[in-house]
Image (cartoon, rainbow, N blue to C red):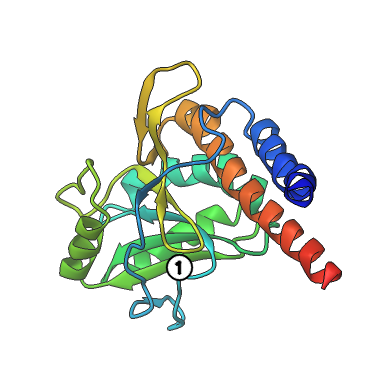
Amino acid sequence: MKKNIVLFILFILPIVAYLFFASGVNSFAKLPVLTPTIPNIETWSTLDGKKATLNNKITILGFIGYDVEKHKGGFFNLYEKIYNRNKDFKDFQMVMVMPQGTQSKVIQLQESLKKLGPQTNWNFIFAPPSEIQNFYNSMKLVGKLDSQLGTPSVYIIDKKRNLRGRKGQNKKGEEEYQEGYNTFKVSDLYNNMIDDVKVILAEYRLALKVNNKANRKI
C-alpha cells in the first residue's frame, strides 16, 4: 500500500500538476477526444510524390479546397501563431489536404510563405475530391466543407489519430465544444488553439519523461 502511494506521489502527481500549469488558460487539463482513430492519409501524395502519415505525429490538419487564394490570409495567421511556435518539436507537423489539380496554386502559395520562414514538416497532400469528402465525413464533425471542398478551420490530431478538441464542462462549469480553429480569426488561434496545442505537446513530453524514468529503473 505504501509503495503505491509513493509511486503515485513520484509519478502521477507531478504529471497532473504539470499538465495543469502547462495548460495556461485552457479550460481542460487534458484535451478531450472528439473522434477516435480517424483514417490515415498514406494513399495520398505530396507535391514531390512522397507519402505522409498521421501515425505517431501531432498534426494540424486543414482542408483548403480549390480556392487557395481565399485561404491565403489564414495560412499567414496559422504560420505565425501556431507553426512558428511549435516547429522545433520533432513530432509536430502541418498537413493541408488539397484537391488534385491545385498543385500550381500550392507552389505559388509556398513561394509566398517563404517570406515568413522555413516550411519544414509543412505538407500539402493531394487527393481526389470524392476521397477528400469521404475522409472529412469520417471525422464526424459538426462543421461542413464548402462547395470548393475547403474550410477556414484546422483540426488537432494526436499521435494515435484521434481528433482532439474542447467538449464538456470547463473549469468554470460552462458547457464548451470546439472541434476546429478558425484561421481567419487571430483571436481563435491566439486565445484557444495556442493553448490547446500546448496541452497536447505537454502530454507527450510528460509521457516520454515518465517512460525514460521507468526504463532507467529497469
Q: Please, what is the three-letter code of the amino acid marked with disc 1?
A: Leu
Q: Is residue 158 left or right of residue 145?
A: right
Would you say residue 132 is visible in this rendering? yes
Q: How many marks?
A: 1
Q: Nearer the viewer, residue 141 or 20?
A: 20
x and y, in percent, of residue 79 in the image: 55, 47
Residue 98 falls in which quadrant of the image?
Answer: bottom left
Which residue: 69% across, 54% down?
205
Which residue: 21% across, 49% down?
145
Give the residue furthest to the right. 216
x and y, in percent, of residue 108 in the image: 44, 61
Q: Is residue 12 left or right of residue 97?
A: right
Q: Nearer the viewer, residue 196 or 16?
A: 16
Would you say residue 116 is visible in this rendering? no
x and y, in percent, of residue 122 in the image: 53, 62
Vertically, is 114 above or below 16?
Answer: below
Q: What residue would you read off at disc 1? A: 54
x and y, in percent, of residue 173 in the image: 43, 17
Q: Residues within 10 Å of mark 1 (few under 14, many from 20)?
A: many
Which residue: 59% across, 57% down?
114
If the image is split into quadrants, where does the C terminus sit? bottom right
Q: Nearer the viewer, residue 133 or 174?
A: 174
Q: Is residue 162 left or right of residue 191?
A: left
Q: Nearer the viewer, residue 126 or 40?
A: 40
